[in-house]
Each structure stands twice: as structure tokens, then as C-alpha cells.
Image: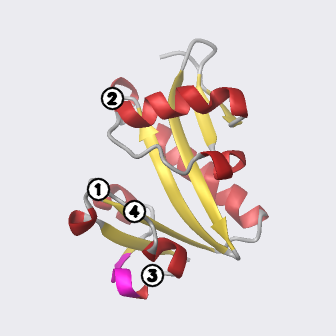
């Protein structure tokens, strides 16, 4: 794999982000208002990973962590998360939450803990997911 670089998303990256999320089975709704908080990993030829953040008064909703299948298990997801966490901290966000259907183990290794959706911050409760019954809420502070 080529050497990767990381950058914040721009409007011109929207279609590529949506394609990557669709490829990984993740929702694409609601990205646009938060695009300035999305980070991409890639080479000059293509994007191989993405992560995003929705910021709500000091609370962050981590979303859209996706890495193309052939680039997984190489630390890209963790690198994206660490960059996003630093970005969140700089922007006054000291509590990160997320919803997941498939990646609970990955995020627990990063220090997230399972919480009841009823105890989640309001923006998290309002998040819509097609697999809501299988969704797990996780928090990290």
C-alpha cells in the first residue's frame, strides 16, 4: 500500500465520502452540515478511509468510520480515530459518543464503554439508524 496522507474533507470530497460509506454499509445522511469535521485517509490515487464528527455543545458524536476492506487491519481506523479525537479536543469537545452495529469490539479497545441509549446525550438519542434495534451506544470521556 502506498504511503497515506490525512486531510480534512472539503466539499469536493463529498461524493467520494458517500461512495466509501456506501461500500462499507454505513449511512450517508447528514454528512454535509458536519463536513468540516471529517478526516480522510488516502493516497494521491484514492481515499481508503474516513471518519467524521458531529459537534453539539461540547459533546461529539463520532460517525462514519470506514476503511475499505483491502486496507483494514493496518492501523488506518485507529489513526483516523486518534486524529479525530485530537481535533475534537482542540474544538472543546471532551466527550465522544457513537452508535455501532458491527464495531463494538474495535471501539472498546480504544477506551469506549457501552452505555444505555437512554443515558446518551440528546443528539445521540435522535440519531436514526436502519438497524436501531441492534445498535449499541458507546461513550468515551
Q: How far apart are marks 3 and 4 (CA)?
A: 14 Å
Q: Specify which label sits upstream in the sequence, 3 or 4.
A: 3
Query: Of circles 3 and 2, which is in front?
Result: 3
Q: Mark 4 points at which residue?
A: 128
Looking at the rendering, the stretch of residues picked out in magenta corresponds to 114-118
Q: Picture coordinates of residue 13 (x, y %)? A: 64, 29
> CB of mark 2 within 8 Å of CB of mark 1?
no
Alpha carbon separation for disc pair 3 and 1: 18 Å
Residue 75 visible from this viewpoint: no
Q: Comparing marks 2 and 4, which lies closer to the viewer?
A: 4
Of tags 3 and 1, the one toward the viewer is 1
**To which residue does mark 1 refer?**
130
Q: How many marks?
A: 4
Q: Which residue is drawn at 43% across and 40% down?
A: 66
Residue at the limit of the structure toward the bottom, as seen here: 119
- Helix, strand or loop at label 2? It is helix
Neighbours of disc 4 within 10 Å: few (<14), some (14-19), many (20+)? few
At a point 76% along the width and 71% down the height, the residue shown is: 92
Q: In which quarter of the image is residue 71?
A: top left
Amino acid at each position: 500500500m502506498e504511503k497515506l496522507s490525512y486531510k480534512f474533507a472539503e466539499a469536493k470530497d463529498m461524493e467520494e465520502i458517500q461512495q466509501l460509506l456506501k461500500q462499507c454499509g454505513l449511512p450517508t445522511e447528514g454528512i454535509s452540515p458536519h463536513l468540516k469535521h471529517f478526516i480522510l485517509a488516502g493516497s494521491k490515487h484514492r481515499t481508503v478511509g474516513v471518519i467524521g464528527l458531529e459537534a453539539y455543545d461540547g459533546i461529539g458524536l463520532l460517525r462514519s468510520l470506514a476503511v475499505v476492506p483491502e486496507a483494514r487491519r493496518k492501523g488506518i481506523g485507529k489513526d483516523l480515530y486518534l486524529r479525530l479525537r485530537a481535533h475534537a479536543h482542540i474544538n472543546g469537545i471532551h466527550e465522544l459518543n457513537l452508535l455501532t452495529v458491527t464495531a463494538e469490539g474495535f471501539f472498546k479497545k480504544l477506551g469506549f464503554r457501552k452505555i444505555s441509549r437512554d443515558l446518551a446525550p440528546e443528539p445521540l438519542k435522535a440519531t436514526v439508524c436502519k438497524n436501531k434495534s441492534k445498535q449499541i451506544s458507546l461513550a468515551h470521556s
